[in-house]
Structures are given as structure tokens and as C-alpha cells.
Image: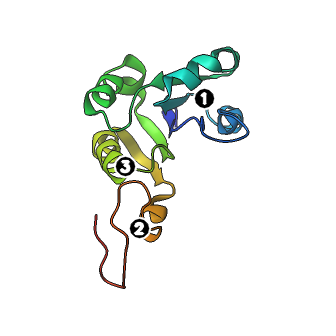
């Protein structure tokens, strides 16, 4: 398809620096975009971003208004989303907000991946979740 490939999270907190997955995605997909919450990191690496074949939208995946404004953009509203990879904040509340907002934009046959959500269930004190203490006791 000719829809948008979207990754939530540019990788600003990675030791090797942000944007490395984008170098692969642009070889495989025509319209690669990222959502990144860290404006300072995005500004620091703006030259690299400008030299790449992908776009970065600065804002929070947990901000419904920000997401809805992206959905109204000409490219997203005409192309839709073919693939979404959520590797953003790893916060349950953000995962839920972005999924509920973006899922309706996913084209028929499209894919929506959520990375690392298991960490919030099995690591005590991880981000914003209540850990699983026993089988069958999972909580949102």
C-alpha cells in the first residue's frame, strides 16, 4: 500500500542516538514518519532528520488533541496508516490513548504493533503500571 508508516518514539533515550530505525524503514516504505515527545532531542538531531527521508512530529502520544490534529493532516487523511509501531513512552495510559486515537486510521490489512508493554506488567515499579503478582491477576 501507499499509506504512512508511523513509529512512535524516535529513540532519543537510546545510547547510540535517535533515528536509527528510520534508516531501515525508508528503504522499505515510501512515507515514514515518527512521533517524538522529546523536543530538545529532536532539535539537537534536526540536521540528521532533515537529511533523512522521514518526518518527525514533536508531541506526546498521550495527547489526544495532538494525535487528532495529525489525523487531519492531508497526508494522513488521504493515505491512512499502513503500519504503526508504538515504541514510545511505554506508559499504559499513553499506549491506550494512542491506540484508541490511531487505530481507526489504520488501513484495511494494516498492522499495529505495541512494543515492550510486558515490561510494565512484570517489572515492579516500572513506569505507571500495577505489576502482576500471580496468574489471572492482570490489571490495566
Q: Going 49% across and 31% down the picture, which residue do you hit?
A: 36
The earlier-in-sequence mark between 3 and 1 is 1
Pick whichever, 108 or 45, lies toward us.
45
Query: Pointer 2 and pointer 3: residues touching (CB < 8 Å)?
Result: no
The residue wearing badge 2 is: 121
The earlier-in-sequence mark between 1 and 2 is 1
Q: Quadrant of residue 122?
A: bottom left
- Residue 9, horizontal then vertical, whole percent: 52, 38
Along the horizontal axis of the image, is 9 left or right of 137?
right
- Residue 32, horizontal then vertical, whole percent: 57, 30
The residue wearing badge 3 is: 95
Between label 1 and label 2, give the one nearer the viewer. 2
Along the horizontal axis of the image, is 106 left or right of 51?
left
Find residue 139 and name its label: none
Q: Describe the element under mark 3 as helix, strand or loop.
A: helix
The furthest residue to the bottom: 135
Along the horizontal axis of the image, is 92 left or right of 86?
left
Query: Pointer 1 and pointer 2: residues touching (CB < 8 Å)?
Result: no
Mark 2 Cα shell of 10 Å, populated few (<14), some (14-19), many (≥20)? many
- Distance from label 1 to label 2 (Cα)? 35 Å
* Quadrant, the C terminus: bottom left
Mark 3 Cα shell of 10 Å, populated few (<14), some (14-19), many (≥20)? many
Mark 1 Cα shell of 10 Å, populated few (<14), some (14-19), many (≥20)? some
Pick whichever, 94 or 124, lies toward us.
124
Find residue 30 and name its label: 1
- Distance from label 3 to label 1 (Cα)? 25 Å
Q: Going 28% across and 69% down the picture, which residue do you hit?
A: 139
Q: Describe the element under mark 2 as helix, strand or loop.
A: helix
Between label 3 and label 1, give the one nearer the viewer. 3
Amino acid at each position: 500500500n501507499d499509506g504512512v508508516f508511523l513509529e512512535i518514539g524516535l529513540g532519543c533515550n537510546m545510547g547510540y542516538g535517535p533515528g536509527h530505525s528510520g534508516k531501515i524503514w525508508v528503504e522499505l516504505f515510501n512515507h515514514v514518519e515518527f512521533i517524538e515527545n522529546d523536543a530538545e532531542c529532536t532539535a539537537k538531531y534536526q540536521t540528521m532528520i532533515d537529511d533523512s527521508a522521514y518526518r518527525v512530529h514533536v508531541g506526546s502520544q498521550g495527547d489526544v488533541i495532538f494525535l487528532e490534529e495529525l489525523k487531519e493532516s492531508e497526508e494522513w487523511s488521504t493515505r491512512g496508516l499502513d503500519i504503526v509501531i508504538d515504541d514510545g513512552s511505554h506508559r499504559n495510559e499513553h499506549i491506550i490513548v494512542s491506540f484508541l486515537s490511531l487505530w481507526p486510521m489504520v488501513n484495511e490489512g494494516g498492522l499495529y504493533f505495541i512494543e515492550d508493554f510486558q515490561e510494565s506488567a512484570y517489572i515492579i515499579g516500572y513506569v505507571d503500571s500495577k505489576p502482576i503478582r500471580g496468574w489471572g491477576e492482570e490489571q490495566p
